[in-house]
Amino acid sequence: MNDVVRSSASLRRRLTVVLIGGAAVLALVLYFGVRLYATQIAQQGQDNILKASVTTILDTAVIRDGTLEIDFPYAALAMLNTASDDRVFYAILQDGALVSGYDGLPQRDTAGSDAASWSAAYEGAEVRLTTAGRRLFTTDRETGITVTVAQTQDALSVTLAQISRNVALFGSGFFLLATALSFWATASTIGPLKRLTQSVTRRGPQDLSPVTKPVPAEMVPLVASLNSLMGRLEQSLTRSEDFIAEAAHRVRTPLATVRSHAETTLHRVDKEENRIALRAMIRAIDESSRAAGQLLDHAMTTFRADHLDRQEINLSELVADLVNRLEPVAEMKDIALVLDAQRRVDVSADPILVQNAIRNLIDNALKYSPAESDIKIIVAHTDHAFVSICDAGPGFPPDQMAGLVHRFARGKNAKGITGSGLGLTIAHDVAEAHNGSLHLSNRAGGGACVTLSL
Amino acid sequence: MRYLISLVLSFWAALASAQNWEARALFGDPDAAQVLKVISSTDIDLFSSVAESFVAGREGVSVDYYVAGTADLDRILRQSPEKFDVAISSAMDLQFKLANDGFARVLEGIDYPAWAEWRRSVFAFTSEPAAIVVNRAAFAESGAPQTRQALIRALRETPERFRGKVGTYDVRQSGLGYLFATQDARTSETFWRLAEVMGNLDARLYCCSGDMIEDVAAGRLLVAYNVLGSYAQAREDLSDQIEIILPIDFQTVMMRTALVSARGPNPIVARDFMEHLLTLRDTTPTSAPALPMLDLDKPASEQSTIQLEPALLTYLDRLKAQRFLQEWADAIIQ
């Protein structure tokens, strides 16, 4: 049955992949986002210090006696000290011409008096520059002072590397945690589905009762549909079994009437050809009646299998009883029923079903046995209780053995012997209902053996 | 004989063409395969033990030691950085600027406290305070002044006695003198008052600590201000004539620094030399220079030395220097 169901992608895998993938994307976003943010903050920190330095220098600019004086304090450059000993460059320009400091330091026009910061290369190193300007007035003219302070970014990159490492650690931790959580979430989501599957799988083949255990809200529609499907299935099965039982019963009673009439008539007629016709008729009626009986047996087996009425019974006694009842039939065919039973073989089983099964098996054996032969019946208890019935008939056709337990299946060599093909099926169903088995084999010297284990 | 003369002549010619050195010495085998060129402001006799212990354990390595003033040293190295391997100077600001301007090689992997080095290129190894050196006889009665204030009072009380007999660095010539003066001025206004007083007494200006110490010992000077205390201490022979005072109001303490020229001819030997120099205090005391070595075990917060930091560039600024030198000249040259 399983190989018929086509499987698309696993729910569990899909859920896990989506959750882990989401966590990975989030971790990456977190990593790059925080790093970008940290870079901006760190850069802003450096820019602020550079700006403070520029402002401090610029504030000390004065024009005295027509010449520029900038007596900037020690702190103006001391504040640029970093843990990584970054190099420091500065330039003081008056009207675009270098007055003091480093020559060739990159310059940039500043809009108004706002300080501007940017990165550039100087002296073979990547530096961060901040520049600001100021206008000074003397009695006769106006002059523009620009101060630029630059610093390498070693400390900044150390800080950034540290932040990157920490954020990477944090991101990995987040990812691992999210992965663990997603496994847990997947397991807890799939759990009810698995439990439902198990509870449905564990049921007996005839158990079509609805699922009553609570299921998650999302699964309610599925389970409801399943329950309704099983309900309809059970209803239709019951109906058809009922129909067969009813039909068999209705047929058997008129058949019995017809048979008694035929027998009465047989006694009355003297013409040989008429007697032959009547005997054939009686045999056909017997056959039909037997078939109807088996159909009834089968229906009963199917019905009772769902509601086993287990009792403690002695299997030997039950079989002995059956043998006694069937002995007259056997004698008519000159067949001996040889019972070899242990004194007590106790089993817990439905006596009516077991009786049904064994009667059908002995019936089969009688049918196939030639005249003046023995049917051996063994009842014993080894590791489980079993009844074995062996005849001296033609045996089972070896290539068909497995299929003979199916309804209405008959052996190739059964031609000329009347039968419905239900006997083995009934025995098989009874064995199954008791968690036992039915084993078919052929005897070495010819003849068939059927073993019913309970 | 003629050969020898020509050799001497050529030597002098070579020397004169390049530079007039204050002194020069060669340590180790003159024909050694590798000659480490060291340019230094430290006197030969104070440093010979270092160079000797360095060449002692090394086959085929010699040290060519050139002595120049701190300002000259800076100028020479900037002009021809490819001619020298190691520069040792007491002018911390100039050394710092050399490194900041890219003249120093970065030496990775040398284990050294962060406060005693900058950018793994300038390494400090001594701790030398600026001292007041006085003639012992001149202050025999009154007792030597222990602070700058006391010195100012002493000079003002008997100006005739001290006229022409006080000396200090000519900060226009000496990088170290300039460093001491600017750091003093940064710390206290007393510096300018002292300069004013010394100027009134026709202060004599010197290029070097050694000369000042000699003159104080000989009585030609009674007071020398901002002399390298370590040099004075090293002159044990003069200890009867001179008294070294480390002023208790505040001290200016310089760290002698060494750096490897970024474009020097022998970078591997130079690094070797630096490692030797920086681990001297751990090895035998005899090979250490006759200078007070830096106490690396003391935490940075307890160090009273001038810090190796970008602020050292402040007084090297052209405008700042111009203004400072003008004020100094106005005070001391009258």
Image (cartoon, coloured by chain):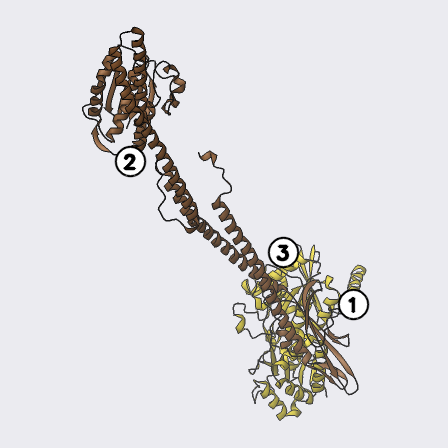
Chain colours: A brown, B yellow
Mark 1 vs 3, N-terminal side: 1
Residue identifier under label 1: B16
Which label was assigned to residue B58? 3
Q: Nearer the viewer, residue A266 or A115?
A: A266
Is A399 placed left or right of A342 in the picture?
A: right
In the image, is residue A43 above or below residue A439?
below
Residue identifier under label 2: A307
Q: Nearer the viewer, residue A27 or A273?
A: A273
- Say if residue B241 shows up in the picture: no
Q: Nearer the viewer, residue B231 or A229?
A: A229
- Choose mark 1 or mark 2, whichever is in front: 2
Mark 2 crowdedness (10 Å alpha carbons): few <14, some 14-19, many ≥20: few
Secondary structure at badge 1 equals helix
Question: Of all residues shown, which one is farthest toward the left?
Answer: A343
Mark 1 crowdedness (10 Å alpha carbons): few <14, some 14-19, many ≥20: few
Is B132 placed left or right of A216 in the picture?
A: right
State the residue at coordinates (64%, 59%): B271
Quote the CA–CA distance across marks 3 and 2.
105 Å
Residue type at tag 2: His
